[in-house]
Image: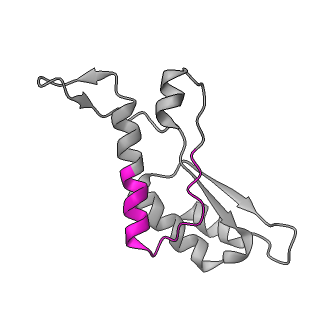
Amino acid sequence: ALDKAIREEYDVLLVDTSGRLSNNDALTAELVKMKRVIQKRMSTKFDDKVKPVPNFNVPHETLLVIDAAQGRMALDSAKQWDKELGLTGLILTKLDGSAKGGSVVAVSRE
């Protein structure tokens, strides 16, 4: 998908990594690797050996989608992924249930 987006000069590419758990180190490592690959493929500069220099300006957004009912797990996930990936925002889902999204207050304060 990234190669096609580059080749066809897309303005936006959304990468959905659905279902990742922050307590699964192997899956978190995959996310970190995906970010490195994106930065390398989106490189505009090269070093002395003509190897791409990672473009740390991409991805432009790294969003975490949180289920409003997750509570403490949402906070733990946000901390872990912010540390590993550098989150730029949150999307809160399922606010129509009994959960009020209190976890977002905790996440935003952390």
Residue at x 58%, y 36% (from the top left corner) = 13
- Name the residue nearer the viewer: 19 or 80: 19
Locate residue 107, reporting x and y percent. 59, 65
Residue at x 73%, y 70% (from the top left corner) = 68
Please determine whether, in this image, residue 23 is positioned above or below residue 92. Answer: below
Locate residue 69, reporting x and y percent. 73, 76
- Name the residue nearer the viewer: 14 or 98: 14
Quarter where residue 45 is shown:
top left
Locate residue 29, reporting x and y percent. 37, 62
- Name the residue nearer the viewer: 1 or 42: 1
Residue farthest along the left direction in this orientation: 48
Q: Per the image, is 46 magenta?
A: no
Locate residue 46, reporting x and y percent. 23, 23
The figure's colour scheme reads one colour
Q: Per the image, is 30 magenta?
A: yes
Residue at x 66%, y 64% (from the top left corner) = 66
Residue at x 52%, y 71% (from the top left corner) = 21
Quarter where residue 90 is shown:
bottom right
Q: How many marks?
A: 0
Please determine whether, in this image, residue 25 is positioned above or below residue 53. Answer: below
| Left or right: 24 as drawn, with respect to 101 | left
Segment tinted magenta in the rendering: 15-33
Quarter where residue 49 is shown:
top left
| Left or right: 39 as drawn, with respect to 96 | left
